[in-house]
Amino acid sequence: MILPSLMWLMVFSTSSDPDPGPALLGLSVDGEVLHPARMSIICAPGEILDLSSPDGDSWHFTSGEPLSCEGSSVAWTAPVSHGVFRLTLSSADLVQEYAVIVVIEASRWRTPTLNSFPVGLYGDGNSRDDNPDCFIEMNPCDEGVRLSSHFTLGEFLGHVEGPYPQYLSLDLRLLDKLEALINEIGDEYPEPVDIHVMSGFRTPSYNSAIGNETDFSAHLYGTAADIWVEGYPPNNLMDDVDRNKRVDVGDGQHIVDIVRRIEASGGISFGGASAYRWTPLHGPFVHIDVRGRPASWQTQLNLVPDPVI
């Protein structure tokens, strides 16, 4: 059932809201069931999506064209314009909102800037095959759009000073992996935990500015995040996840071990995972990505002496 546009006035959940937990109503996109914590999908302009929910029976879209609707299933054509739109799925007393992100395809981007935003060039700048498949346009009102139970769009935006709109690439499989990590840590760690994203997407320009000379970093393609796990109350520092009363690179390595366990259990994308040490600027953190194959690299000892808590 498609209801009138009055329902479209409902707003997205934002990062200032309490953790909403898993999605109340599950969603399948083109036959693929989304991770229970996922509350977002990505599509191309004008793309036709086959959406279904075993529990939902009412569908509300802020844009695009519903082609057909048969109770728990709907065929929907995305708008030809890019942006962040909303799907509201409901059944009885349950209502679940999904962010529908219509992206800018990489074929529309040919220069070092995108709508005046300083992206830089991928690879040697001569091949479009080096570019990400697409970019997400983000305005200030989109920063708090909830992508999954614990993460919002603005958390993955690159560190680029300047006006909006800004742009980022983001693989939503990364969200699924981070949510699975939170669940797994929660099973063995008594305090409520959250994940802080220290670095998500990076433009080639920013990546070069911070001294990273690689042009194939997973951060450039939105498939990686540098994170630390934080308990309550938050203190902007990795928690003692391995419970040895020290905050050090060992806590990051413990998280890497959990990531490998999650990957082996199936259903989550394989990727790189390595722990990083203390520095004078920040505490330990972990790089996690979804490159499609396991990868790791050597970590080093602490630079800050005796990080005892």
Image (tube, rainbow, N blue to C red):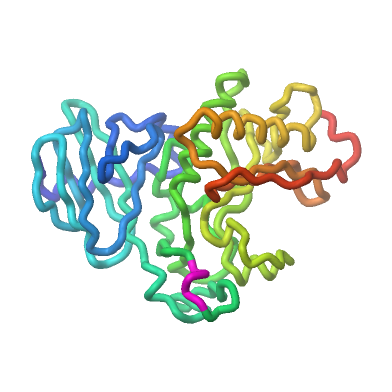
Q: Is the magenta stretch mostly helix, strand or loop?
A: helix
Q: Give left or right: position of 123 versus 12.
A: right
Residue 150 makes an appearance in the image: yes
Viewer-nearest residue: 17 or 188:
188
Viewer-nearest residue: 152 or 81:
81
Q: Give left or right: position of 237 versus 138.
A: right
Instruction: Identify which residue is drawn at 78% across, 37% down.
Output: 249
Q: Is residue 249 on the magenta stretch?
A: no
Above or below for 271 versus 307: below
Residue 187, horizontal then vertical, whole percent = 56, 20
Instruction: Identify which residue is drawn at 33% across, 46% down.
Output: 12
Instruction: Identify which residue is drawn at 20% across, 47% down.
Output: 50
Which image quadrant for residue 227? top right
Residue 139, horizontal then vertical, whole percent = 41, 62
Residue 210 makes an appearance in the image: no
Which image quadrant for residue 235? top right
Viewer-nearest residue: 11 or 54:
54
- How many badges with numbers are in the image? 0
Question: Which residue range is magenta in the image?
Answer: 127-131
Q: Is residue 129 on the magenta stretch?
A: yes
Residue 292, horizontal then vertical, whole percent = 53, 47
Q: Give left or right: position of 134 versus 206.
A: left
Instruction: Identify which residue is drawn at 23% across, 28% down.
Output: 94
Q: Quadrant of the N terminus?
A: top left
Q: Quadrant of the C terminus?
A: top right
